[in-house]
Image (spheres, rainbow, N blue to C red):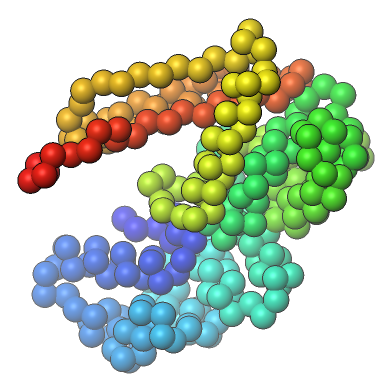
Amino acid sequence: MTSVLDYDNYRNFLKDVLQEKIRKNPTYSLRAFARQLAMSPSHLSRALSGQKRLSVQSARLVSQSLAHSPEEAEHFLALVEIEGARSDEAKNKIIGRLAKDKRAGSRVVALETFRAISGWHHFAILSLTTTRGFRADAGWIAKRLGIKPLEAKLAVERLITLGLLEKTPKGWRAVNDANIETADDVGSAAIRENHRQHLELAVKALEEVPVELREFQNLSLSMNFSEMPKAKKMIRSFVKRFNHELETNPGQEIFQMNLQFYLLSKSEKGRA
C-alpha cells in the first residue's frame, strides 16, 4: 500500500494513490478519485498538475477521505503547509517537524530536508559529535573539517532547526545517532550535488591521505541490465552491514566511504 510517510511531495503521493487504484480497478478514474476526496474533478486535476495548491482545509478533508492515521495525517498536512510557507524560516520549522520521524535505526528524510543540508559538512558534523573529545564550538568544528567557522556555525544552526542536532547539558548531540538516509532511487539535484561533493573529496583524499588510511577499489564486469536491482540491493546491504559492524561511539576520527557503481560502456545502437 502507498504510504504518505514515504513521500516528500503530496502531489506525487496523490498521483501514486490514483495509479494504485487504477491498477486494482482499470475502470477507476480521476472523476471517481475526486468523488472519494469530496473534490471536483477539475480542482483535483489542477492540484495534481501543480496549477493549483491545496489549502490546509482541503488537505484535512483529503486526509480524512484516505483514512490516514494521526501520524500520516500530520505528515500529509506538513507537506501541504511547506508549499504554502511564505518564508524560509516558516518552511524550516515545518521541515523540522517532518525530520523528527524516526525509523528502525535510521531516519529517512524528505527531500525538502535534504536540500537544506545537502552540503557534505552537515553530515560530517553529525558524525563528529560522536567522536571522543568533541567540542560544541563552531571554530573547533571548522578546524577539524577544514571549513570556514561561519560555514560551521550556519550548519549547526540549520541542523538544530531541522531537529537533527539537539542541545544537551554536555553540548550538542546528533538525534538518532546521525543515521540519515534519503528514499531509494529518487532523482534530485540536491542528492546529485551531495554525491559530486563527495567525489571531489575522494579525489583530494587520493592525493593527500596516507595509503594506510584509505582504500580505493575498482572493478569492471560484464553484467545484464536485469541484474541491476540485485546489484543495488547487495550494495545497500553491504553499506548497512559495514556501518553496523564498524561504527564506534565514541570514535577517534571521521572516515568517509563512497561506492560508485554505474553503466560504463555505451550501448550499441539498436540494443535495449
Instruction: State the image coordinates of residue 193 (x, y, percent, origin top left).
Output: 54, 49
Relative image position of residue 123 (x, y in whole percent) = 66, 40
**In the rendered picture of this protein, how many numbered marks are placed on residues?**
0
Q: Which one is in front, 262 or 100?
A: 262
Q: Is residue 69 visible?
A: no
Residue 175 figure quarter: top right
In screen coordinates, is 126 left or right of 217? Answer: right
Nearer the observer, 122 or 90: 122
How far from the left and from the top, in percent, is residue 9? 46, 66
Task: Please tell me in which quadrant of the rendered image residue 87 appears.
Answer: bottom right
The N terminus is located in which quarter? bottom left
Indicate the position of residue 262 as horizontal and vertical percent values: 34, 34
Quadrant of the frame with the C terminus:
top left
Image quadrant where residue 19 sits: bottom left
Q: Relative to 35, is 4 above or below? A: above
Residue shown at 46% from the left, 55% from the top? 188
Left or right? Give the position of 103 relative to 67. right
Q: Is 64 left, or right, of 155 in this rendering? A: left
Closest to the observer: 133 or 195? 195
Q: Is residue 38 above or below residue 242?
A: below
248 w.r.t. 54: above or below: above
Confirm whether residue 132 shows in the render. yes
In the picture, measured across the screen, residue 36 lies left or right of residue 47, that is left
Above or below, comparing residue 246 to residue 151 in the picture:
above
Residue at the far left in the pictured view: 270
What residue do we see at 38% from left, 66% from top?
12
Residue at 54% of width from left, 64% of height from top?
75
Q: Residue at x 18, y 39 (%)?
A: 267
